[in-house]
Amino acid sequence: MKVLTYHRRVDAPITPELLYEGKAKQVFTTDDPDVVLVRFKDDATAFNAQKRGTVVDKGVVNNAVSAMLYAELEARGMATHFLQHVSERDQLVRRVSIVPVEVIVRNRAAGTFAKRYGVEEGIDLAPTVVEWCYKSDALGDPPMNDATAVALGIATPEQLEALFDLATLVNEYLLARFALAGLEVIDFKLEFGVDAAGELRLADEISPDTCRLWDIESGERMDKDRFRRDLGGVEEAYHEVLRRLRETAGRPVEVAGADAGADEGALHDA
Ligand code: AIR
Ligand code: ASP
């Protein structure tokens, strides 16, 4: 009997391997060990996956929104994981090891913050509130302070300081960027990762799934709260956010804060 042996052609692409599947995204290997492909799904979950559903084209919108914002942040000197928007649902990013800290930035009270402290949604928060949560689905992402993060070996004091500074810079940019699109950034969540060279990079995504965005004129919610709270018009809101960001792409973004007046490279200075 003839024995057939198969040899993989040296130049043949390696079959992508699913590395990780989260609630809203899948991560695949690529030919380059330092690069992974992120695929955005339409699956929607809320309240630590107690509520589940699908939002048609959510993955397409979030992929596009996130790609646009990360490219803009990179252009202003911020280190992110983003490399390339490759198709409707896919983007290539640098492979990073995620720091298990969810960084929450709040400009106004909303969501769990309003509930926790018994305040009305929408009250202005000064100074801007930056919170840490331990990224653990099993534990429901519990809030933690600096000492907890350090004592449990979740992050180093230096990392926490860098996360705070980077989150503040991202907030200043997003406030100005979304204002151009007629949207106010109420709060959002960021994740960071460490790349092969040891550099801290903004990772995950920035999208209507991860930000609260209120229409500046009407106060209408244009984000995942429409899904969480059964407000209807979820798909329309997501598409509208993307439409407005595209419409205003390339307009000068006047970032407030310590670097007011600085232009390109402003994100480097702080
Ligand atoms: N967030 C937190 N965990 C997952 C996400 N997406 C985001 C929410 C909201 C902010 O963090 O989308 O913009 C604060 O969420 P919460 O639930 O603490 O009020
Ligand atoms: N995405 C998270 C979850 O499923 C939190 C949220 O957005 O409400 O539970």
Image (cartoon, grey):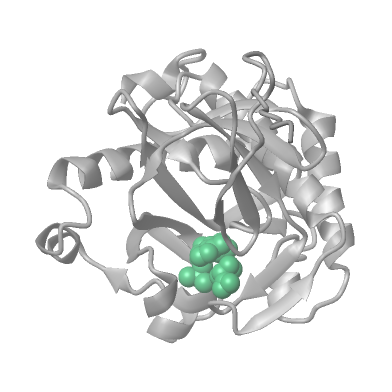
Taking depth in this image into account, of 55 and 127 the one nearest to the observer is 55
- In this rendering, the answer to whether 9 lies above or below 179 is above
The percent position of residue 158, horizontal first and vertical second, equals 16, 40
In this view, 136 is above or below 240:
below
Ligand 2 shows up in the quarter that is bottom right
| Residue placed most toward the observer, 205 or 139 | 139
Kindly identify the residue that appears in the image at 15 percent across and 64 percent down: 152
Quarter holding the C terminus is top left
Q: Can residue 122 be seen here? A: no
Question: In the image shown, does 142 or 184 lie closer to the viewer?
Answer: 142
The residue positioned 64% from the left and 23% from the top of the image is 7
Camera sees residue 173: yes
Residue 32 drawn at (x, y percent):
53, 23
Residue 101's quadrant in the figure?
Answer: bottom left
User: What residue is shown at x 63% (from left), y 42% (from top)?
Assistant: 38
Quarter the N terminus occupies: top right
Left or right position of 171 against 251? left
Left or right: 200 in relation to 244: left
Residue 26 lies left or right of residue 95; in this view the side is right
Residue 46 picture location, percent across and down: 62, 75
Relative to residue 169, is residue 111 drawn left or right? right
